[in-house]
């Protein structure tokens, strides 16, 4: 892959918090259509990396490019307009609102920040229901987000992220806190999404990572210590030492 072909290109990113170097010179390129996992121990810098890509946290140094364009100085909503969508590590739904209204709100935001309410298309509830069906929530449209199970809320968050019609989907621990059955369900949901949708997935569950990712980057103390095809990273001795442990060494 030539570097010009990258849909997301991160170059020499540094982010410090006081004395902590959460990102310490990270460079990663994600090609269009690629499904890239970012793994690493707690505190490795994974969420910080996603926040710097989305623009929620400015980098101390370094560059973020989307489709070749330097977006480092752009606000999060401007990057969303360029096709970045995300699902958070922790819940970002509106708890009292019905599942359908959480998605409809995301569709309205996508339609434009200054659009008068009366001009929001009446097709939005139908579009919202279609997205809910896509993530396995058919029949749950009218249930307030707070009454959904944890797994269902994560499915709803995926629908909210998809409502932005992103070119790139950033997923921060989509299976966090899920039961094995919930994990299997959302993993297959993500696997079944359009192959043209580029993904960057932060995930601790290695079964999920190997199911979803074409390539894997390994972060350790703010640095990339391995980056390559999933099968190569699985066999990397240093990765096994710092992160994967026996589970993979014996696989
Ligand atoms: N807002 C912040 N203020 C101060 N320190 C922070 C902040 N955000 C992150 N850090 C620190 O930066 C480092 C990286 O944190 P980050 O949340 O990116 O790790 P992570 O890889 O996502 O970990 P986890 O797997 O636990 O989610 C940690 O040492 C963390 O304490
Ligand atoms: Mg994190």
Image: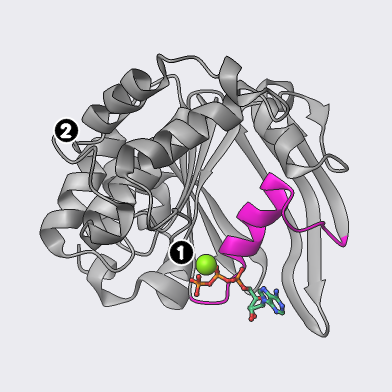
* Residue underneath mark 1: 90
Q: Residue furthest front?
A: 118
Name the mark on residue 225.
none
Instruction: Name the secondary structure under disc 1.
Output: loop
Disc 2 versus disc 1: nearer the observer: 2
**Pointer 1: residues within 10 angstroms few (<14), some, or many (20+)?**
few
The vertical placement of 191 against 53, above or below, is above
Q: Which residue is mark 2?
A: 138
Instruction: Look at 57% across and 62% down and name the residue there.
Output: 46
Residue in the image at 44% along x and 19% along y? 196
Q: Earlier in the sequence, mark 2 or mark 1?
A: 1
Asked if one can make out residue 112 in the rendered structure from this viewpoint, the answer is: yes
Name of the residue lying farthest toward the bottom: 19
Q: Describe residue 131's horizontal placement relative to residue 199 as left or right.
A: left
Count of marks placed on residues:
2
Q: Which residues are magenta?
A: 42-60
Picture coordinates of residue 210, whole percent (x, y): 30, 48
Up/down of 147 relative to 75, above or below:
below
> Label 1 near label 2: C-beta < 8 Å?
no
x and y, in percent, of residue 76 in the image: 73, 43
- In the image, the residue with mark 1 has its CB under 8 Å from the nearest atom of ligand 2: no
**Can you give x and y, in whole percent of width and height, for residue 125 in the image?**
35, 24
Q: Position of residue 114 (x, y in %)?
A: 73, 27
Question: In the visual, does 96 lie left or right of 49?
Answer: left
């Amino acid at each position: 892959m030539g570097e010009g072909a990258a849909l997301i290109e991160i170059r020499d990113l540094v982010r410090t918090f006081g004395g902590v170097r959460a990102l310490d010179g990270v460079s990663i390129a994600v090609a269009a259509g690629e499904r890239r996992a970012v793994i690493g121990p707690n505190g490795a810098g994974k969420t910080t990396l996603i926040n710097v890509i989305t623009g929620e946290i400015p980098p101390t140094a370094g560059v973020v490019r989307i489709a070749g364009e330097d977006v480092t100085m752009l606000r999060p909503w401007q990057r969303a307009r360029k096709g970045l969508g995300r699902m958070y590590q922790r819940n970002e739904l509106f708890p009292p609102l019905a599942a359908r209204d959480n998605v409809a709100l995301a569709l309205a935001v996508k339609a434009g920040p200054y659009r008068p309410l009366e001009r929001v298309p009446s097709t939005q509830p139908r579009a919202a229901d279609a997205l809910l069906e896509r993530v396995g929530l058919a029949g749950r449209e009218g249930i307030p987000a707070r009454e959904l199970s944890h797994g269902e809320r994560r499915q709803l968050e995926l629908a909210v992220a998809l409502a932005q019609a992103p070119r790139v989907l950033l997923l921060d621990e989509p299976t966090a806190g899920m039961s094995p059955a919930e994990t299997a369900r959302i993993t297959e949901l993500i696997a079944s999404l359009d192959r043209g949708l580029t993904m960057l997935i932060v995930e601790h569950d290695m079964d999920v990572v190997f199911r979803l990712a074409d390539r894997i980057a390994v972060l350790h103390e703010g640095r990339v210590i391995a980056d390559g095809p999933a099968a190569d990273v699985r066999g990397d001795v240093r990765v096994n030492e710092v992160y994967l442990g026996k589970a993979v060494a014996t696989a």
